[in-house]
Amino acid sequence: MPENNNVIATLNRVHTGNPEDDEIEIDLGQLFFALRQKIVYLLLALVLGLGLGFGVSRFVLTPTYTSTSMIYVMTKETTLTSLADLQIGSQLTTDYKVLITSRTVMEDVIQKLGLDMDYNQLRSKITLENPSNTRILNISVLDTDPAKAKQITDAVAESASNYIADIMEQDPPKIIEYGEVPLKKTGPHNSRNAVIAGVIAMLLVAGWVTIDTITNDTIKTEDDIENYFGVPVLAAIPKKDPEAARRAEKQGENYRRHERKGGRH
């Protein structure tokens, strides 16, 4: 039955208050149809999200830069030819990672460079990476100032080398390469952020449509009456069509006028 029809039905069962009767059934077909009807809003949300995400990423978020220095884990006193077990090299790499980000090294770097941060904040800027099958540690520093990123990574490498030599009572690990001032930014990724924002915006609109569809219990068709109340529809009276009613009224008036003329004859 069309949505604009009025439905007259005999209802012999009402809501009982049973929790089982309160379960919400999701009609995937109906949900798909509802989403398809709102496709314009979904696409509009996607476009607006893409634009907003790109704009915020490009003009609001502060660019960040990464500089990397490298140190060699092994020293003259501990070389692979003098080790009984090759696994010692990997163990030393793990130990170095802990020592490089220790509070002692972080505070020493802060003091040397006069940084306005605590050791936890400095530690959060540092990323350590051990390339596969090597005894090399990459010390990467992320900062909004490319020159400062280089200064910090160099200072961390030097302080860590001295601290490791003191703790392990060996020659300082060799600094293979100091960092350089990065010319390209590490982030933010404008395109990725735009896509993420666009998808989130579209999902929010889709979620709103889904909730509205599921929670809307307005009776629109005979099937709704049977689904909600479990009874068949006995009769349906179409809604009055104003144009058809106007034509019928005009025809009736013409008929009555014709009858009156016939009666006078």
Image: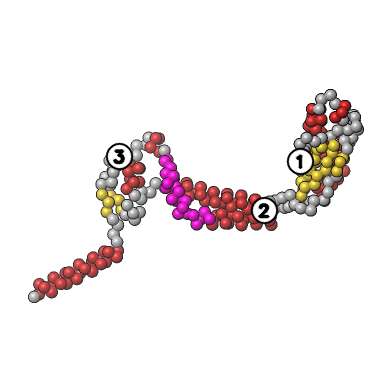
| Residue projecting furthest to the top | 84
The disc, 2 or 1, on the residue closer to the chain's N-terminal end is 1
Q: Which residue is mark 2?
A: 190
Q: Nearest the camera: 122 or 196?
A: 196
Distance of label 2 from label 1 (alpha carbons): 22 Å
Q: Which residue is mark 1?
A: 127
Q: Quadrant of residue 119?
A: top right
First of labels 3, 2 by sequence position: 3
Task: From the top left corner, tell me how far across and down residue 99 is, in percent.
Answer: 82, 33
Give the amino acid type for the residue marked by disc 1 in the picture. Answer: Thr
Region of the chain picked out in magenta, as a range: 24-43
SS state under label 3 = loop
Q: Specify the quadrant of the image occupied by residue 11.
A: top left
> Residues under labels 1 and 3: Cα distance?
67 Å
Give the amino acid at mark 2.
Asn
Q: Is residue 83 visible?
A: yes
Residue type pointed to by label 3? Arg
**Residue 163: horizontal and vertical position, in percent?**
87, 34
Which of pointers 1 and 3 lies earlier in the amino acid sequence? 3
Task: Report, in whole angstroms, how far the alpha carbon at label 3 lies from the one at label 2.
Answer: 58 Å
Q: Residue lying furthest left in this view?
A: 265
- The residue under the point 43% across, 42% down is 26
Give percent across and percent down for residue 47. 57, 56
Left or right: 226 as drawn, with respect to 125: left
Mark 3: give few (<14), some (14-19) or many (20+) Cα within 10 Å.
Answer: few
Q: Are marks 3 and 2 in contact (CB under 8 Å)?
A: no
Q: Which residue is mark 3?
A: 13
* Residue mark closest to the camera, 1 vs 3: 1
Image vertical order of residue 5 relative to residue 89, above or below:
below
Q: Residue at horizontal 68%, vertical 56%?
A: 58
